Amino acid sequence: MSTGMNLTLKVWRQPNSQAPGRMVTYPAADISPDMSFLEMLDVVNDQLSLKGEEPIAFESDCREGICGACGLVINGVPHGPGKGTTTCQLYMRSFKDGDTIHIEPWRAAAFPVVKDLVVDRSALDRIIQAGGYTSVNTGSAPDGNALLVPQDIAEEAMDAAACIGCGACVASCRNASARLFVAAKVKHLGILPQGQSERAQRVLAMVQAMDEEGFGNCTNEYECEAVCPKEISASHIAFLNREQAKACWNPPRQRGASDGA
C-alpha cells in the first residue's frame, strides 16, 4: 500500500517574457515526504514527458542551498514554508496529503520571465559588476596574518557575505527592492580594510546600477529579512543608507584626478 502523498499543483506556465502566462493544474501522485521540492517537480516532469506534454521549466544548479538558482514562490512565499532554507532544501514533509500548492516565479520587472518558473536574474550580476569587488592592484597576495582584522568585524563581514544573490528579497518586497542584496554586498567589503580605498565609489556605483535596473526602493517592511535563506539582517540596509549619504555628501574623486587646485 502506498504511503506517498497526493497533491494538486497549480503552476505558472509562460512560454517566454512576451507571451501571456497562466496557472495550470497538475496532479502530483504518490509523492514521498522525504523528497525535496525539486525532486517532486522532477517526478511531475517525468510524468508529463511520458504523456508527451511539455515539462515545467524551473532552474536549479547546486541543490545544496548555496547558489540561489532554485528560487520559486510557493504558496505566496519565496522559497516556501520554513526559515533559512532555499527551495532545494525544502522537503515535501512540510506539506500534507491532499494539499494544493501554488508555484510561481519571482515577480519583479527587473526579473523578466524566461520560461515558466525561470526568470532572468542577471540584473543582480550587473549590480555586482558596477562595484561589488576590490579592483586595487596590490601586487601578490599578502600573508594572511599581515593585515589584522578584528574578530567582530570579520564575523560581521562574513554574515553579510553569506548572501547568495537568489533574489528572494526582491520577490518578497511589495516594491521589488534589491536593497538588502546591495546592502549585503556593500557591507562585506565596506567594513574590511581591503575595501576602504573604493568604499564611497562602490556604494554610489552599485546603488546607481540598482536604480537603473528598475528595482524599487525600500520602505522598511522586513519581508526581505523574513524570507532570506541565509537570514541576512535588514540592519545592513541602515548601513547602506549611511554609506550612501556619506558618499553623496563627500563624493569620491575620480582616479587620476590631480591633487592640485
Image: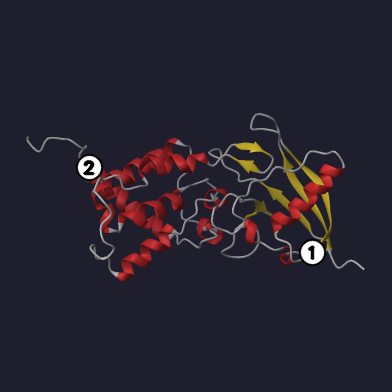
Residue 168 appears in the figure: yes
Relative to residue 162, is residue 73 depicted above or below? above
Write the residue at 64% across / 32% down.
17
- The quadrant of the picture occupied by the C terminus is top left
C-alpha separation, residue under disc 2 versus residue under disc 1: 57 Å
Relative to residue 88, is residue 244 depicted above or below? above
Please give the residue where the numbered disc 1 appears in the rendered image.
Answer: 32
Give the colour scheme shown: secondary structure
Q: Nearer the viewer, residue 153 or 103?
A: 153
Helix or strand or loop: what does disc 1 sit on? loop
Helix or strand or loop: what does disc 2 sit on? loop
Which labelled disc corresponds to residue 236?
Answer: none
- Residue type at mark 1 is Ser
Write the residue at 29% across / 58% down.
192
Q: Nearer the viewer, residue 200 or 216?
A: 200
Left or right: 64 with respect to 141? right
Of callouts 2 and 1, the N-terminal one: 1
Which labelled disc corresponds to residue 252?
Answer: 2
Find residue 71 and report its horizontal and vertical position in percent: 61, 51
- The residue positioned farthest toward the bottom in the image shown: 151
Left or right: 83 with respect to 21? left
- Residue type at mark 2 is Pro
Find residue 83 and report its horizontal and vertical position in percent: 59, 65
